[in-house]
Image: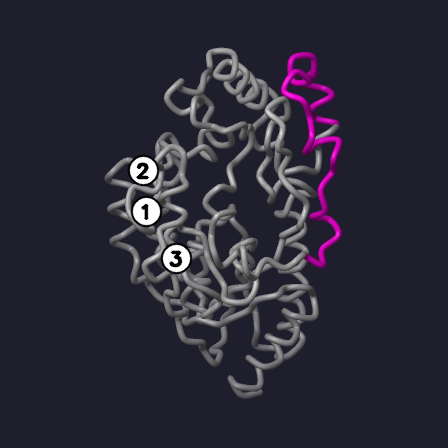
C-alpha cells in the first residue's frame, strides 16, 4: 500500500475505534526541546523529579522506539455536560476524573488501532503511548494537526475544544503527514486571568509549583501551603478553571460518546466532611477504577482538610 492509502486506512480505523481526532507526524527530534529544558531549569516541574528523567527520549520518539518513522496522534473527547457542584460543602473534582480511569480506555483503543494498522501491511509494527510513556503528547498532537497548544498549555481544537485525552501509536512506516495546527488563541488571556494561583506565569507556560492540579494530585507533601489552599476555590482533585473559561470550550464543547467517562455522583458529589471518616479500604473500593486513586487516600484527606481549613479561617 502507498503512504497515502495507509494513512487513509489508519485514519478510518482510528475513528472507527472511537477517537474523535487523529493526525500524522514524522517521528523526529522535537522542535520544542529547548522549551522543555528551559521549563525544567526554571524548576517549574516542582517535585515531579521524574520529569527530569529520559529527556532525550521525551524529545525524540526514536530513542523510545528505534524503528519509529511516524507518530499517529489521537484524541478522545471526555467532556460531559454535567455541572461542577456549586456548594462549598462539596469538594470539586476535575471533569476528567468523573468516570473510569482514561488510561485503561485509551490503551485499549490504542491497541485496537495498532492491531488494525498491522493487518493493513505485514511490514507494520509499532508501540502505543498514553500519558505514562516518555513522549510529549501535546507536542505530537500539535505536529499532527489535531490542535494547538493553548495559553493554558492544553491542546485546543476548533471543533470540540480542549476536553481531550491524548495518545500515540508510533509506527515503523512512513505516512502522509499533516500540517501542524495554527495557533488560534489570538489576544485572548481568559485562562491566564482566571487562574486563581497565577500558575500560568506567561502564555503557554505553567509553573506546577503554583498549580492546583499539581498540589491536589501529584504532590506528596503532608500539607498544602496556605498560600495555595486559600485560592483553591473548593477543588480537591485537579482544577478545570482555565478550561472552563476558554471561549473555545464555551462554544464547541461536545458531549462524549464514551459511556465510561460519565460521572459517578457518589464520588463526584462527596461532602468534604465525608473524607474525615472514610477509611483507606473504602477509598480503594470506591475509586478502584477512577483517576482519583492517583492522589491516594492520604492525599485526598489532606486536600479536603486544606479546603475546610481555609473555609473556617475566612
> From the viewer's perspective, is the residue at label 3 or at label 2 nearer?
2
Say whether disc 2 or disc 1 marks the residue closer to the N-terminus.
2
Q: Nearer the viewer, residue 184 or 69?
A: 184
Give the CA distance from mark 3 to mark 2. 24 Å
Quadrant containing the N terminus in the rendered view: bottom right
- The magenta segment is 256-285
Q: Is residue 158 left or right of residue 253?
A: left
Residue at 51% x, 32% y is 217
Q: Is residue 192 above or below residue 63?
A: above
Q: Which color scheme does this rendered protein use?
A: one colour
Marks 2 and 1, Cα distance to the nearest angstrom? 9 Å
Q: Position of residue 117 (x, y in %)?
A: 62, 73
Give the CA distance from mark 1 to mark 3.
26 Å
The image position of residue 112, as x and y in percent, is 68, 63
In the rendered structure, the answer to whether residue 85 lies left or right of residue 187 reads right
Q: Residue at x 52, y 42 (%)?
A: 240
Judging by the rendered image, the residue that carries numbered circle 3 is 63
Q: List the residue tagged with mark 1.
A: 205
What mark, if any, has residue 44 been given in the picture? 2
Label 3 Cα neighbours within 10 Å, binned few <14 / some 14-19 / many ≥20? some
* Rendered residue at 66%/67% (across/down): 115
Pointer 1 and pointer 3: residues touching (CB < 8 Å)?
no
Q: Element under label 2?
A: loop
Q: Secondary structure at mark 1?
A: strand
Disc 3 or 2, which lies upstream in sequence?
2
Instruction: Evaluate if marks 2 and 1 touch, with contact meaning CB atoms under 8 Å apart.
Output: yes
Quarter occupied by residue 212: top left
Mark 3: secondary structure: helix
Whole-percent x and y of residue 218? 48, 32
Q: Sequence-wise, which precedes: disc 1 or disc 3? A: 3
Amino acid at each position: 500500500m502507498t503512504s497515502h492509502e495507509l494513512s487513509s486506512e489508519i485514519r478510518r480505523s482510528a475513528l472507527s475505534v472511537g477517537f474523535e481526532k487523529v493526525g500524522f507526524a514524522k517521528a523526529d527530534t522535537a522542535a520544542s526541546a529547548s522549551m522543555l529544558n528551559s521549563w525544567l531549569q526554571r524548576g517549574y516541574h516542582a517535585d515531579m523529579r521524574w520529569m527530569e528523567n529520559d529527556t532525550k527520549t521525551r524529545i525524540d520518539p526514536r530513542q523510545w522506539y528505534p524503528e519509529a518513522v511516524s507518530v499517529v496522534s489521537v484524541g478522545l473527547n471526555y467532556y460531559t455536560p454535567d455541572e461542577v457542584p456549586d456548594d462549598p460543602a462539596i469538594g470539586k473534582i476535575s471533569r476528567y476524573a468523573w468516570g473510569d480511569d482514561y488510561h485503561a480506555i485509551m490503551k485499549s483503543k490504542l491497541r485496537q488501532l495498532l492491531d488494525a494498522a498491522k493487518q493493513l501491511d505485514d511490514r507494520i509494527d509499532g508501540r502505543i503511548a498514553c500519558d505514562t510513556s516518555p513522549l510529549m503528547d501535546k507536542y505530537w498532537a500539535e505536529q499532527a494537526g489535531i490542535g494547538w497548544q493553548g495559553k493554558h498549555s492544553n491542546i485546543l481544537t476548533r471543533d470540540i475544544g480542549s476536553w481531550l485525552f491524548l495518545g500515540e501509536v508510533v509506527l515503523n512506516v512512513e505516512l502522509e503527514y499533516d500540517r501542524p495546527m495554527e495557533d488560534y488563541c489570538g489576544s485572548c488571556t481568559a485562562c491566564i486571568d482566571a487562574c486563581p494561583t497565577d500558575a500560568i506565569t506567561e502564555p503557554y507556560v505553567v509553573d506546577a509549583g503554583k498549580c492546583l492540579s499539581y498540589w491536589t494530585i501529584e504532590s506528596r507533601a503532608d500539607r498544602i501551603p496556605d498560600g495555595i489552599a486559600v485560592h483553591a476555590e473548593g477543588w480537591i482533585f485537579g482544577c478545570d478553571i482555565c478550561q472552563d473559561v476558554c471561549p473555545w470550550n464555551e462554544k464547541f464543547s461536545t458531549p462524549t460518546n464514551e459511556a465510561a467517562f460519565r460521572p459517578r455522583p457518589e464520588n463526584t458529589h462527596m461532602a468534604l466532611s465525608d473524607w474525615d471518616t472514610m477509611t483507606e479500604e473504602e477509598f480503594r473500593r470506591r475509586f478502584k477504577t477512577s483517576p482519583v486513586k492517583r492522589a491516594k487516600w492520604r492525599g485526598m484527606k489532606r486536600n479536603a482538610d486544606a479546603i475546610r481549613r481555609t473555609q473556617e479561617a475566612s
